[in-house]
Image (cartoon, helix red, strand yellow):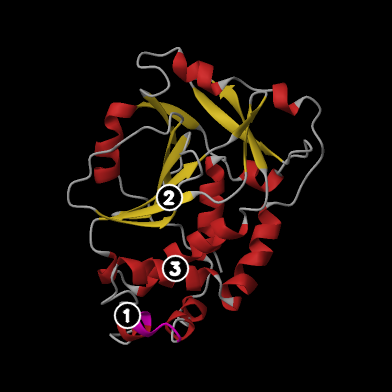
Amino acid sequence: MKWTWLGALGLVAVAVPLQAAAQAPAAISDEPSASEAAATGPDRPLAGMDEAQIVAFFDLMSATDELEALLAPAIATMLEPGEAVPGWRESGVDILAELGARDGGVAGNLLRDDDTAVLSVTDFSGNAAPDLPGFTSVRLRAAPPGGASQTVYASFESGVWMVLEMQPIRRGNAFCYTGLNGVTLYSREPLSAWDEGTTYLMAAMVATFDRVADREVCVVYQREGNAFASRSYLPDGRSLPYLDAESTLVRVMPAAGLSAFIRDAVPALPTPPVE
């Protein structure tokens, strides 16, 4: 999955009106323990919840009609196909060979996106294990069967990271992604202390990933100087112009720097829309 997906999905999630997402406590009113926790106040939607109740909250939020109505049109736009591109699978570079030829091999080299508003780093070995003392973690979705062969670390808000575990299929130089990802949230503060904005942003992100799980999107990397550009396709070779237009370059980053990057990097504030 191309990391512009993260930026594009982030834009989708940010666009979700808070007042619509704020119906979540009502959505979990049939779940006694979650209902009691939600009663502690709408400004801290997860206050009083244990880990199982937090997972249930995100599951219920993902299934709401309100989020479906808001996300479906944006996802359709994001995945609107363009023209078919002959030879797309053989285009670009073998990114695993590119990383494997460097000191440390594939496991020792990551790809970091240039995007400053949605931070993301991709581990093509799936074996990175950042040291994050003081962070709270909650697993929302199980890892793919057989484990992950790629892991993405993404941040949309200071102190909060989403970790996605994936198992893409190789088709030539392309990586093709489908199915549910493993999802774990890491946070400097307990999730029970999150405010409405953070809670519903991450709920919208999880709901979006749930909704695109039945689609297949393929990614090819092209060399751009000392960096790489990613190009997205449907399995039949049609391009995805929206994703490509939103893309930024990715650059090699030593895996040894991942822990410090997660601890210290802060996403830039989004630019307000022009009215």
Specify the quadrant that holds the C terminus: bottom right
CA distance separating discs 1 and 3:
16 Å
Q: Does the magenta portion include 31?
A: yes
Dot 3 crowding, Cα within 10 Å, few <14, some 14–19, many 20+: many
Residue 199 location (% of width, % of height): 38, 68
Highlighted range, magenta: 30-34
Of the numbered discs in the image, which one, if any, rests on residue 58?
3
In this rendered view, identify the residue nearer to me: 265 or 2.
2
Q: Element under label 3? A: helix
Q: What type is the residue that disc 3 sits on?
A: Phe
Residue position for label 1 = 43
Earlier along the polypeptide chain: callout 3 or callout 2?
3
Circle 2 Cα neighbour tier, 10 Å, few/some/many (<14 / 14–19 / ≥20): some
Q: Amino acid at mark 1?
A: Asp
Tell me where residue 243 appears, x and y as whole percent. 63, 45
User: Residue flagged by tag 2: what amino acid is it?
Assistant: Ala
* The one of 92 and 37 positioned closer to us in this rendering: 37
Residues 141 and 188: in front is: 141
Q: Which mark is residue 117?
A: 2
Q: Mark 2 or mark 1, which is nearer the start of the sequence?
A: 1
